[in-house]
C-alpha cells in the first residue's frame, strides 16, 4: 500500500471549467467521490499528477424528470439516489442496486458517475441501467454526445470516454417505470462487499413474457445484457419450465473469469440461479424499496 | 476557479469551531484530523474505506475520512465524537455503549457511535434491520456486534 | 453454578470465602457484571493507541520486503536510497549490533533477512526517514539483487524428498507424538470406525489496528511503546537484537486495537526494528505497518491437514483414535512447537479415549509464517475431532449430544495424554446446559421439516477443551504489584496488556473485592517493564487466571497488613476486624471504625509496609515428550456450541441463524466481559468457518485487505446468541477463575459443519465453508 503522492488539485465549479481543465492538462484525472480512485492510488495502480474534483459542480448533482426521462447528474451520490423520491417511485431497480452497494459511508461519498466511469465489471449500477436502456450524456469541449449505456464500457477499467470528456448525465426513459424491475446480488457476505454475480431483470408479464430484459455484472469483462435469454423468453408462457430453460441460456452468454472472489464455474452456475431468482421475484412483484 | 500546485487554504467547521488551514491536496481528511489537528478519535485502520474506523460526519453524514481528500472539506462541516458533548443522541449512546458492554478494544467505537448517531437522529425507533444497515460499514473484530446492536436499541429507547 | 467437592488447595473459592469472611453472594464485584471503567475514554477517542502517540519529532521507519518467495540475497544496494532528502539511514542485517535473530522457539528467523528470503514480504531492510514520504521513496530506491530459488508452497509437496529446502535441516520443523494404550486393540474392539481427512485454512487476525511501535532513545537506554501482548518478551527480543542490557530497555504496553495472538508474535518483531532504527539514528522512530503489510507479513493461523481415524463400540464408547497432523508453519517455526504440541495433546477432543496414536508434524513452506491465533492450534484439531464424533454418532444411530455425553471428560477421568483430571471439569454440565438452552432434541427433530425448497435448515453441536496458559513442563508464573497510597487509593501494576478483553479490569475487581473498597479507588497503571512486575504474556487465556491470581496474592498481603493495623488502631482482636465499603471496623462494635484513607495514612505513620508484590506460580506439570503422556496443562476450560444454520442449496450460502455458546470458566469474575469474549469469539469463529481465507498465487497473498479477506459484518452474525456460563471453580486460582477468550472460538467451525451436514446430508471437511465450496459439494452429492 502506498501513500497518496503529491498532485495538483483543481476544484471547478462548472462543467465548462472542468472540461477546459481536462483540455489543458493531458495528465489530469477526474475525481468525484474518490471511493474507487483513492484505493487505486494506494494500490499503486494509478499515480495522479493533477486531479479535477467535480464533486462541487452543482449542475452534476440532481435527480429530476423531464422530457420523458428521469435524469441523474453524474456526481449524484448513491445515498441521494437511494433517497430519491422520483427513482423510488418510478424505477426502483436502480435503487435496489444502490442499496447494497458498499456501506453507508461509501454511499455517502461515491457517485453513480464514478461507479460507471471506473468501469469495474462488477459495478452494481451498470446492470440496472442496462436493462433500463439508459442513455449517457457525455460532455466534451466540442459539445455533448449521447450514447446508450451498453456502448459505454470497453473492458475492465475502460470506457469510451475520451480523456477530455466527462460523463454528465444519465437518462432513464420514464416509460420503463411501468415494468417490474429486480436487482439481485451475490457477494461473499451479507453486506459491504463486491459482487460475485449481480443481475438486474426488468419485465412485463402476465401469462406470457410480453417483454423481458436481463443484465448481469461481474461475469464478463464488462456488464452485459443476456440478449439470447431474453429473446428465448420473450413471448413464452410464464411457466417454471420455460424460465428454467430460458435461464439455462444465460450460462452460455456469460464469460466470467476466475479470481479471488469466485471461480468461473461458480459464476456461471450462479448467473443462472440469480437471473432465475430475479425473474421469479419480479413476477411475484416482491420488490423491496426504501 | 482555484488553481493550486501546492498548498491550498481551506476553511471548514470542525466540531462547531471554524478552522482555517493550509492543506496539501494529497492529504486525506483523516490525515488532516489526526496528524495536523490532533483529533484522534477517527482511527487509521484499512485506508481504503473497508473498515469504518475513520468514520466522521461530513455535512452531517457518515463518511470514511480516509477516502476524502482534504481540499474537498473546504466549506464543509465536520463532526467527530470530540464535538458531540451534550448532544442528546450521543449522550444516550455513550451511556448505553458503556452499560451494555459494547466496547472492547475501542478501536472501532468512535466510528461506530457516529454511524449509530446518524441513524438515531433520523429514526426514533429503528428496527433491527435499520440498525444493522446503519453500522454495516463499521467492522468490529472484538464484540461480534451483539452488544453494539443492543446498545443502539437501548439508546433509542432512552431517547423516546 | 455448582461446586462438586470441597477443595482444600490454597486459593480456590473456599479459601477466598474464608479469608474474606463472606459468602459468594456477598461479593460486591467478583461475579457481578460492571460497567467497564475504560468505556468512556474509548468512546470519546481519548484512549491512546500507539499511533495516537505520534508527535512531530518522531521519524518513520518503513520496511523493504522480499519480492520473492524463495531466493538468495546477492546484494542489498542502499546508496541511492541514502541520497533521498529526508532519509536518515538504511538498516540491513549487517547493521544489527546484537543478534539478528527473532526465532521464538527455534533460532531460524532473522530480524532482517541476510543470506536468503523465504517468503514474499519478508523484511530485508529498514529505511528511516524524517517523514513517511521520504521513507517510502527510500524503500523504493533500495535495490535488492536476488538469486531466485525454486519454492515450495504446499506442505505435502514440502515433505517429498525432492522438494526445495526452506531451511537447511529440511522442511520438517518439528514432530510430536502420543502413544497411549494399544491402538490396534482399540480398533478391534470398535464396532464402527470412521476415517477422514480434514483441511483447514490460513486465518488472519484482522484486528483493526495495524501493528505499531515507537522507540525513543533515552539517556543510555531506550523506551519502546507498542501494542503488544507481552512487554517483557518484547524487552527480551529488543535486548537480543540491540545488544542493550534488559535494564536499559523500557517497554510500555499501549492498549491494542485487537490482538488475538497476532500481536504476541508481531510485537517483538516490530519493536526490535523500531528500537534498532532509533538507536542507529539517535532519534525517536515509529514503525507503523499499513493494513496490507499486516496481511502480507504478519503471522497467521496454521493451515492444517489432519487424517483422523476413530472407533467406538455400539454402546457409544470411544475405543481408539489414530491421528496424523500436519500443521504448515510457513517460512519460520515461530510458535509452531507450542501450537503443534497444543493441537497434539488436545487431539482427541474433550473425551475419554483409552487408546491413542497421534503423530504431528510442523512443516516449512515458502509462505508467510504461521503463529499464535486465538485457540492456538485447537480450532483445527477440533474441526476434525468434532466432525468425527458426529459421524460416529450417525453410524451408531445415537444422538450427537448423547454420544458426546457418553464419552466426555469428567473428574477422575484421563485425557488423551493420560492426565488425570482431578477438578474443575465442566464439560458434561456445559454440554447439557447448552443443549437445554438450545432446545436441542426438539430442534433436531423439528428442523427436518425444513428440507423442501432451496433453503434447508439444520442444527449442529460441537464441544472443545482448551488448556490454560503454557503447556507441558514449561514453568509458568505471574506477578503483580499493589501500592496503597497515602490517601487510600490503590496503584495497581501488572504487565498483562489491554487488548480489549478486560483482564486488567478483572484484576482491579479482585483487588477491590479483597480490600472491600470501591473499584474506582484502584488505579490501573500502564504496563511498563521498568515499573511493573513481570506478569508474563497475555496469551493462552492466562491474563485473568494467572495475572489475577498474582493480583489477589498482593491484595491479600495488603489486606492482612491492614487488618493487623486496624486491630491496633481499633483496639480490636484481628479476627474481629472487618474491611467493608472502604472502612475497617470491629465486628463487636461496628461504630468502632476507621476510614480507609485514615488507615492508609497510619500505614505509613506506623511503619507498616504499604506495597506488595504478588506472585503466582502455576502448579507444576509433568510431561514426557517421548510418549506425549503426562500433565499437559494445569487446568482446562470446557466449551460447547450449538448452532442453527440455514443452507441455500442453490448458492451454497450458509447462514447461522441462532447460536448457543457455553463454557465452564471456573469462576466468572465478570460475566459481562465473559459474554463479550464469547460473542466475539463466535463471530470470529463464524468468519473462520464460512468466509475467511488468506489466498495465494505463487506464494503471493492476493487478498491483502478487507475488500477481499472477508470478515463478518453485523449482518453476518446471528441475531440470536445465547451465552451460558458454567462455574466449576479451580482450586489454585483467585476465586476459582480459569480463562475463556480462546476456548470460545474452538467449537464454532465444527458446530457449523455439523449443522450443515444435518441440514443437507453432506459433510464438508474442508474449511472455510464458502458459498462456492458448499454449492459444489452439494452438487457432488452425498459422500
Image: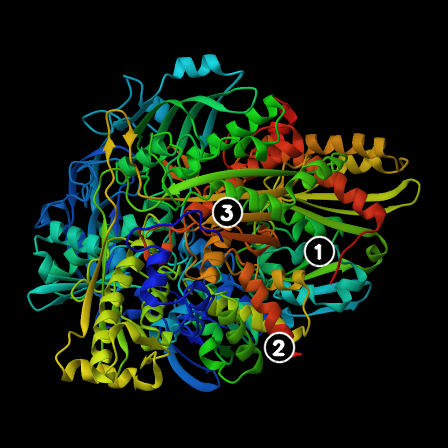
In terms of secondary structure, where does tag 3 sit? loop
Tell me the chain of label 1: A
- Badge 2 marks a residue whose secondary structure is helix
* Residue A260 in sight from this viewpoint: no
Q: Are marks 1 and 2 on the same chain?
A: no
Element under disc 1 = helix
Residue of label 2: B158
Residue C271: which quarter of the image? bottom left
The answer to which quarter of the image holds residue A82 is bottom right
C362 left or right, relative to C610: right
Q: Nearer the viewer, residue C676 or C228?
A: C676
**Residue mark closest to the camera, 3 vs 1:** 3
Give the mark toward the camera: 3 or 2.
Answer: 2
Q: Subunit of mark 2?
A: B
Residue C710 numbered tag: 3
Where in the figure is residue C269, as x and y percent of width and height?
23, 50
| Residue C523 seen by the camera | yes
**Residue named by callout 1:** A96
Residue A236, x across and y down, in percent: 89, 35
Left-right relation of C447 to C240: right
Q: Nearest to the eye among marks 1 and 2: give it.
A: 2
Cα gap from disc 3 to disc 1, whole angstroms:
23 Å
Amino acid at each position: 500500500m502506498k501513500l497518496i503522492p503529491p498532485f495538483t488539485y483543481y476544484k471547478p465549479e462548472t462543467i465548462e471549467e472542468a472540461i477546459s481543465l481536462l483540455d489543458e492538462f493531458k495528465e489530469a484525472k477526474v475525481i468525484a467521490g474518490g471511493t474507487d480512485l483513492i484505493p487505486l492510488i494506494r494500490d499503486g495502480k494509478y499515480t495522479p499528477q493533477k486531479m479535477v474534483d467535480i464533486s462541487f459542480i452543482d449542475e452534476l448533482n440532481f435527480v429530476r424528470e423531464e422530457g420523458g426521462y428521469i435524469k441523474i447528474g453524474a456526481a449524484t451520490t448513491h445515498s441521494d439516489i437511494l433517497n430519491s423520491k422520483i427513482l423510488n417511485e418510478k424505477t426502483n431497480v436502480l435503487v435496489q442496486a444502490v442499496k447494497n452497494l458498499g456501506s453507508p459511508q461509501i454511499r455517502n461519498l461515491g457517485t453513480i458517475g464514478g461507479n460507471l466511469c471506473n468501469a469495474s465489471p462488477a459495478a452494481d449500477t451498470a446492470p440496472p441501467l442496462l436493462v433500463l436502456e439508459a442513455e449517457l450524456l457525455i460532455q466534451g469541449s466540442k459539445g455533448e454526445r449521447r450514447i446508450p449505456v451498453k456502448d459505454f464500457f470497453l473492458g475492465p477499467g475502460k470506457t469510451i470516454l475520451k480523456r477530455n470528456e466527462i460523463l454528465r448525465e444519465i437518462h432513464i426513459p420514464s416509460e420503463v417505470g411501468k415494468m417490474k424491475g429486480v436487482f439481485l446480488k451475490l457477494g461473499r457476505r451479507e453486506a459491504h462487499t463486491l459482487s460475485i454475480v449481480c443481475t438486474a431483470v426488468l419485465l412485463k408479464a402476465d401469462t406470457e413474457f410480453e417483454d423481458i430484459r436481463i443484465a448481469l455484472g461481474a461475469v464478463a469483462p464488462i456488464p452485459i445484457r443476456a440478449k439470447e435469454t431474453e429473446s428465448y423468453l420473450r413471448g413464452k408462457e410464464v411457466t417454471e419450465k420455460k424460465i428454467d430453460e430460458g435461464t439455462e441460456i444465460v450460462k452460455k452468454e456469460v464469460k466470467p473469469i476466475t479470481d479471488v472472489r469466485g471461480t468461473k464455474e461458480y459464476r456461471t452456475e450462479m448467473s443462472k440461479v440469480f437471473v432465475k431468482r430475479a425473474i421469479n421475484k419480479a413476477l411475484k412483484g416482491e420488490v423491496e424499496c426504501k | 476557479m482555484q488553481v493550486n500546485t501546492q498548498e491550498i487554504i481551506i476553511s471548514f467547521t470542525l466540531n462547531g469551531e471554524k478552522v482555517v488551514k493550509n492543506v496539501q491536496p494529497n492529504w486525506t481528511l483523516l490525515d488532516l484530523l489526526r496528524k495536523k489537528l490532533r483529533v484522534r478519535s477517527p482511527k487509521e485502520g484499512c485506508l481504503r474505506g473497508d473498515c469504518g474506523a475513520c468514520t466522521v460526519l461530513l455535512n452531517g453524514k457518515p463518511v470514511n475520512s480516509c477516502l476524502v481528500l482534504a481540499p474537498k472539506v473546504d466549506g464543509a462541516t465536520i463532526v467527530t465524537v470530540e464535538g458531540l458533548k451534550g448532544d442528546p443522541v450521543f449522550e444516550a449512546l455513550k451511556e448505553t455503549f458503556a452499560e451494555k458492554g459494547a466496547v472492547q478494544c475501542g478501536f472501532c467505537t468512535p466510528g461506530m457511535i457516529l454511524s449509530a448517531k446518524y441513524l438515531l437522529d433520523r429514526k426514533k425507533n429503528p428496527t433491527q434491520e435499520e440498525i444493522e444497515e446503519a453500522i454495516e460499514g463499521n467492522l468490529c473484530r472484538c464484540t461480534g456486534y451483539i452488544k453494539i446492536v443492543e446498545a443502539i436499541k437501548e439508546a433509542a429507547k432512552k431517547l423516546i | 453454578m455448582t461446586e462438586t467437592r470441597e477443595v482444600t488447595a490454597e486459593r480456590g473459592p473456599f479459601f477466598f470465602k474464608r479469608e474474606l469472611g463472606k459468602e459468594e453472594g456477598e461479593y460486591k464485584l467478583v461475579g457481578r457484571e460492571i460497567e467497564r471503567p475504560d468505556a468512556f475514554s474509548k468512546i470519546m477517542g481519548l484512549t491512546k493507541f500507539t499511533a495516537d502517540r505520534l508527535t512531530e519529532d518522531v521519524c518513520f521507519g518503513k520496511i523493504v520486503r522480499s519480492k520473492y518467495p524463495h531466493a538468495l540475497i546477492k546484494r542489498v544496494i542502499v546508496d541511492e536510497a541514502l541520497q533521498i532528502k529526508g532519509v536518515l539511514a538504511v538498516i540491513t542485517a549487517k547493521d544489527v549490533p546484537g543478534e539478528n535473530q527473532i526465532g521464538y522457539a527455534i533460532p531460524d528467523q532473522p530480524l532482517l533477512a541476510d543470506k536468503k528470503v523465504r517468503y514474499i514480504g519478508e523484511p530485508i531492510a529498514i529505511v528511516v526517514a524524517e517523514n513517511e514520504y521520504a521513507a517510502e521513496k527510500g524503500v523504493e530506491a533500495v535495490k535488492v539483487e536476488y538469486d531466485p530459488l525454486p519454492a515450495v508452497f504446499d506442505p505435502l509437496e514440502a515433505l517429498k524428498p525432492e522438494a526445495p529446502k526452506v531451511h537447511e535441516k529440511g522442511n520438517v520443523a518439528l514432530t510430536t507424538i502420543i502413544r497411549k494404550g494399544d491402538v490396534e486393540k482399540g480398533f478391534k474392539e470398535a464396532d464402527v470406525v470412521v476415517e477422514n481427512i480434514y483441511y483447514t485454512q490460513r486465518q488472519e487476525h484482522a484486528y483493526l489496528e495495524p501493528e505499531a511501535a515507537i522507540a525513543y532513545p533515552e539517556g543510555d537506554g531506550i523506551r519502546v511503546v507498542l501494542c503488544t501482548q507481552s512487554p517483557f518478551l518484547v524487552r527480551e527480543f529488543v535486548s537480543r537484537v540491540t545488544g542493550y542490557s534488559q535494564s536499559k530497555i523500557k517497554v510500555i504496553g499501549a492498549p491494542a486495537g485487537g490482538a488475538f495472538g497476532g500481536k504476541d508474535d508481531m510485537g517483538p518483531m516490530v519493536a526490535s526494528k523500531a528500537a534498532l532504527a532509533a538507536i542507529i539514528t539517535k532519534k525517536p522512530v515509529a514503525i507503523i505497518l499499513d493494513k496490507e503489510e499486516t496481511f502480507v507479513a504478519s503471522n497467521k493461523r496454521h493451515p492444517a491437514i489432519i487424517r483422523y481415524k476413530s472407533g467406538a463400540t455400539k454402546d457409544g464408547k470411544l475405543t481408539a483414535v489414530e491421528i496424523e497432523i500436519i500443521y504448515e508453519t510457513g517460512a519460520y517455526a515461530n510458535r509452531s512447537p507450542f501450537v503443534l504440541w497444543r493441537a497434539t495433546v488436545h487431539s482427541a477432543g474433550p473425551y475419554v479415549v483409552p487408546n491413542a496414536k497421534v503423530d504431528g508434524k510442523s512443516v516449512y513452506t515458502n509462505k508467510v509464517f504461521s503463529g499464535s491465533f486465538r485457540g492456538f492450534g485447537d480450532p483445527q484439531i477440533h474441526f476434525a475431532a468434532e466432525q468425527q464424533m458426529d459421524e460416529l454418532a450417525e453410524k451408531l444411530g445415537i444422538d450427537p449430544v448423547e454420544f458426546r455425553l457418553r464419552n466426555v471428560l469428567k473428574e477422575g477421568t484421563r485425557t488423551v495424554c493420560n492426565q488425570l483430571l482431578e477438578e474443575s471439569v465442566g464439560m458434561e454440565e456445559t454440554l447439557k446446559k447448552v443443549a437445554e438452552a438450545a432446545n436441542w432434541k426438539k430442534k433436531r427433530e423439528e428442523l427436518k421439516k425444513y428440507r423442501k425448497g432451496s433453503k434447508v435448515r439444520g442444527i449442529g453441536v460441537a464441544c472443545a477443551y482448551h488448556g490454560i496458559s503454557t503447556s507441558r513442563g514449561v514453568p509458568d508464573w505471574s506477578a503483580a504489584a499493589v501500592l496503597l497510597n497515602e490517601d487510600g487509593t490503590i496503584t495497581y501494576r501488572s504487565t498483562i496488556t489491554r487488548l480489549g478483553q478486560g483482564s486488567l479490569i478483572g484484576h482491579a475487581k479482585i483487588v477491590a473485592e479483597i480490600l472491600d473498597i470501591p473499584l474506582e479507588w484502584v488505579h490501573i497503571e500502564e504496563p511498563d517493564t521498568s515499573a511493573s512486575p513481570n506478569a508474563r504474556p497475555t496469551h493462552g487465556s492466562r491474563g485473568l487466571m494467572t495475572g489475577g491470581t498474582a493480583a489477589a496474592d498482593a491484595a491479600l498481603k495488603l489486606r492482612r497488613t491492614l487488618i493487623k493495623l486496624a486491630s491496633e488502631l481499633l483496639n480490636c482482636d484481628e479476627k474481629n476486624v472487618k474491611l467493608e465499603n472502604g472502612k475497617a471496623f470491629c465486628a463487636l462494635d461496628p461504630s468502632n471504625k476507621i476510614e480507609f484513607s485514615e488507615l492508609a495514612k497510619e500505614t505509613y505513620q506506623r511503619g507498616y509496609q504499604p506495597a506488595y508484590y504478588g506472585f503466582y506460580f502455576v502448579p507444576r506439570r509433568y510431561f514426557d515428550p517421548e510418549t506425549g503422556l503426562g500433565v499437559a496443562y494445569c487446568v482446562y476450560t470446557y466449551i460447547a456450541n450449538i448452532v442453527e444454520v440455514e443452507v441455500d442449496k442453490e448458492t451454497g450460502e450458509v447462514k447461522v441463524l441462532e447460536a448457543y455458546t457455553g463454557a465452564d470458566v471456573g469462576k466468572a469474575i465478570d460475566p459481562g466481559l465473559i459474554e463479550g469474549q464469547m460473542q466475539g469469539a463466535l463471530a470470529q469463529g463464524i468468519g473462520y468457518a464460512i468466509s475467511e481465507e488468506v489466498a495465494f498465487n505463487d506464494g503471493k497473498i492476493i487478498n491483502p485487505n478487507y475488500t477481499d479477506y472477508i470478515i463478518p459484518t453485523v449482518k453476518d452474525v446471528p441475531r440470536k446468541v445465547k451465552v451460558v456460563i458454567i462455574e466449576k471453580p479451580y482450586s489454585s486460582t483467585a476465586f476459582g477463575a480459569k480463562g475463556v477468550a480462546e476456548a470460545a472460538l474452538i467449537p464454532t467451525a465444527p458446530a457449523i459443519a455439523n449443522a450443515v451436514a444435518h441440514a443437507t446430508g453432506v459433510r464438508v471437511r474442508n474449511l472455510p465453508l464458502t458459498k462456492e465450496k458448499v454449492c459444489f459439494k452439494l452438487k457432488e452429492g452425498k459422500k
